[in-house]
Image (spheres, rainbow, N blue to C red):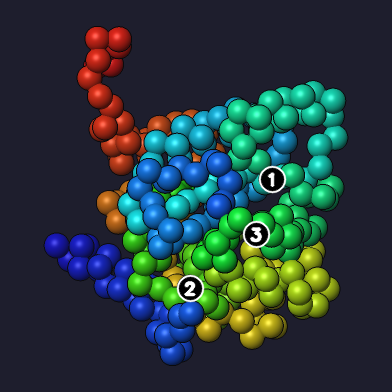
Amino acid sequence: MTMKIRFDSLLKFGRCAFQKFPYQSSNSSSTNFLATNSSSDDIRILIGILTLPDQYQRRHFLRLIYGTQSPMGAQVDVKFVFCNLTKEDQKVLVALEIMRYDDIIILNCKENMNKGKTYTYFSSLPEILNDTDRPYPPYHYVMKADDDTYFRLENLVESLKPLPREDLYHGYVIPCPSMDPFVHYMSGMGYMVSWDIVEWIRDSEVPKNHTEGPEDKVFGDWIREGHKAKNRYNAKWSMYNFPEPPTRCTHELWPDTIAVHLLKNQEKWIQTLKYFNVTSNLKPSKLYHIP
């Protein structure tokens, strides 16, 4: 009972963090995992998973993970993001993936982790998504996510519904013991900003002149130096690192989870997916028998 009260109080702290400042408010691609449960008035979210061209198996696995989630009240597009192709086999295999799934963004950059890939991703989106057939903004929120993070889309959407759609910065606050989103920055496991900040990243000299370094910390530096994101949401402890090995950033798996990070092997993925009972909607059929 004491543990439950502690969890609830931590969640309330994180969910109310953006209220430190006054409340502000103001067709995506074919790979939309929530098309059947969304309308034109719903929240539009782009999740860009930064990965590498050769990670074919990981992309196919993540398509299963996100393609079987259908939260209500949102349009969520999950895209895999990497830099220019460099091998002949990539030009064939990635092209086939695009033809089949249409869920890949290839940036005009040389593959890297902390030398500007994140900047290229965010700053390129306004031009990539500049389509008169789309609503404006094309997405209310844009996320950069790791490919070893599991997002529960229903809980992510619910966390966003009461939040502003302008000048917002959402994620897991670093350092791990901190609960104050106005001090440092959000973890690279998966952070999100509103569309106006995406456009600011494209236009401002602040991020353009500071692209190298740990990407999540550098992103936080942009926000601080540009005096952006007066609305911030700390999703701790609904976002956390996998419980093992225990650190100050880990948390036990629990129902109010938005994201679990550091799923570095299949065993950790399976343990996480089993805990959240992701196959509960499997329909009975004479075609298969799964005990």
Q: Is residue 91 left or right of residue 242?
A: right
Lateral position of residue 187 relative to residue 252, left or right? right
Identify residue for label 2: 165
Q: Which mark is residue 157?
A: none
Looking at the picture, tell me which residue is in the foreground, 21 or 95.
Answer: 95
Between discs 2 and 3, the one toward the N terminus? 3
Looking at numbered disc 2 in the image, what kind of residue is underneath it?
A: Arg
Instruction: Kindly identify which residue carries mark 3.
Output: 132
The correct choice, above or below, for 56 with respect to 232 in the image is above
Q: Position of residue 130 (x, y in %)?
A: 69, 59
Residue name at image x 44 percent, y 49 percent: 151
Residue at the spot 20% in from the left edge and 62% down from the top edge: 4
Q: In the drawing, does residue 96 fall left or right of residue 1?
A: right
Q: Cβ–Cβ below 8 Å for labels 2 and 3?
A: no
Picture coordinates of residue 11, whole percent (x, y): 32, 69
Q: Residue furthest bottom?
A: 22
31 or 239: nearer the viewer: 31
